Image (cartoon, rainbow, N blue to C red):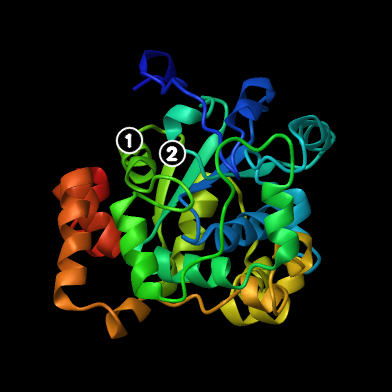
């Protein structure tokens, strides 16, 4: 199908809260080779930024991902500052968003990589991220005049309560989860969208990175692959966490090593009971449908769900 005959997604709304200012996309000037990395949050975003950065810079060991790949729709710093910095970049740009498709400006000129992860694993990772946030993190998000809506508060002591709050109030205290996944799932057949699953990256990182390279039309010489694979490994990213975490991890107790936490799945199995698990699975089926819910739970093990 020719690009001109496609029905491209259109922006239908703005999203504002203690984190978001989606209006920045209205003023962003796309280039033909831009890469947009999209996730809900805590779904492998930093890992994908590292992968794309390594592919663009051919395995270099000094890729400053937080600086080179900003979260465009984050309210801080102000969009005027961020847009100027991004416009000044001369390398192939790779940007980050946590917005659903209909809250950003979708461009046929860019390539989009969406990373999915089981929502239960998202909650466990999010809880660590939230519980270890320090006073500077809260001040940056809450104590600015541009904030819309209520401030973000510290999480409860119980991760089980956090899980149920997140399900009962659709992503509380961050932003809606199901619409994020559903919007990108609906766009999965577009030629400039690639769906990647966290579990598939864990199972076959090398194969998935080669798949991503093909999608981005990046030819990697074989002598660069060992460095790329090493620099994208969890152990390397944990050892060099200050290169991956925003502001070197200064917003979290324990620093960047807290931001790059465990990178594992299934920790919820030790805490959630059968009823807690069924609650999530019923919601996933209701909000996403069987095929998308299966993909979100298992990635490529969902029997070809992406192509369906």
Q: Nearer the viewer, residue 235 or 146?
A: 146
Task: Label 2: state its secondary structure.
Answer: strand
- On the image, numbered disc 2 is attached to which residue? 193
- Whether residue 51 is visible: yes
Q: Quadrant of the C terminus?
A: top left
Please tell me whether residue 180 is drawn above or below residue 131 in the rendered image: above
Q: Is residue 177 left or right of residue 298?
A: right
How would you rate the neighbour count of disc 2 (Cα within 10 Å): few for under 14, some for 14-19, many for 20 or more? some
User: Cα distance, mark 1 to mark 2?
Assistant: 7 Å
Disc number at residue 103? none
Q: Nearer the viewer, residue 226 or 67?
A: 67
Q: Nearer the viewer, residue 31 or 155?
A: 155
Q: Quadrant of the N terminus?
A: top left
Which residue is located at x 62 percent, y 26 percent?
23
Q: Position of residue 122 (x, y in %)?
A: 41, 63
Residue at the far top: name it: 4
Q: Position of residue 235 (x, y in %)?
A: 61, 82
Q: Quadrant of residue 21?
A: top right
- On the image, numbered disc 1 is attached to which residue? 189
């Amino acid at each position: 199908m020719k690009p001109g005959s496609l029905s491209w997604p259109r922006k239908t709304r703005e999203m504002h809260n203690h984190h978001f200012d989606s209006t920045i996309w209205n003023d962003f000037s796309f280039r033909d080779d831009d890469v947009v990395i999209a996730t809900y949050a805590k779904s492998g975003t930093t890992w994908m930024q590292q992968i794309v950065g390594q592919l663009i810079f051919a395995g270099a060991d000094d890729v400053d991902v937080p600086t080179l790949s900003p979260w465009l729709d984050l309210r801080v710093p102000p969009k005027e500052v961020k847009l100027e910095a991004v416009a000044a970049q001369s390398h192939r740009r790779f940007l980050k968003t946590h917005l659903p498709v209909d809250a950003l400006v979708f461009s046929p000129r860019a390539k989009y990589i969406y990373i999915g992860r089981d929502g239960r694993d998202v909650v466990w990772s999010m809880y660590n991220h939230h519980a270890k946030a320090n006073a500077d993190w809260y001040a940056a998000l809450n104590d600015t005049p541009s904030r819309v809506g209520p401030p973000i508060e510290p999480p409860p002591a119980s991760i089980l309560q956090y899980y149920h709050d997140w399900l009962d109030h659709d992503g509380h205290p961050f932003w809606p989860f199901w619409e994020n996944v559903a919007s990108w799932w609906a766009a999965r057949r577009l030629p400039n969208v690639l769906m990647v699953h966290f579990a598939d990256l864990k199972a076959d990182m090398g194969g998935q990175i080669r798949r991503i390279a093909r999608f981005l039309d990046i030819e990697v010489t074989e002598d660069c692959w060992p460095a790329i694979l090493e620099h994208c490994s969890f152990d390397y990213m944990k050892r060099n966490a200050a290169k991956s975490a925003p502001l070197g991890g200064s917003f979290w107790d324990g620093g960047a090593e807290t931001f790059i936490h465990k990178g594992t799945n299934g920790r919820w199995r030790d805490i959630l009971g059968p009823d807690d698990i069924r609650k999530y699975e019923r919601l996933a089926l209701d909000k996403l449908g069987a095929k998308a819910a299966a993909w979100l739970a298992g990635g490529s093990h969902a029997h070809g769900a992406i192509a369906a």
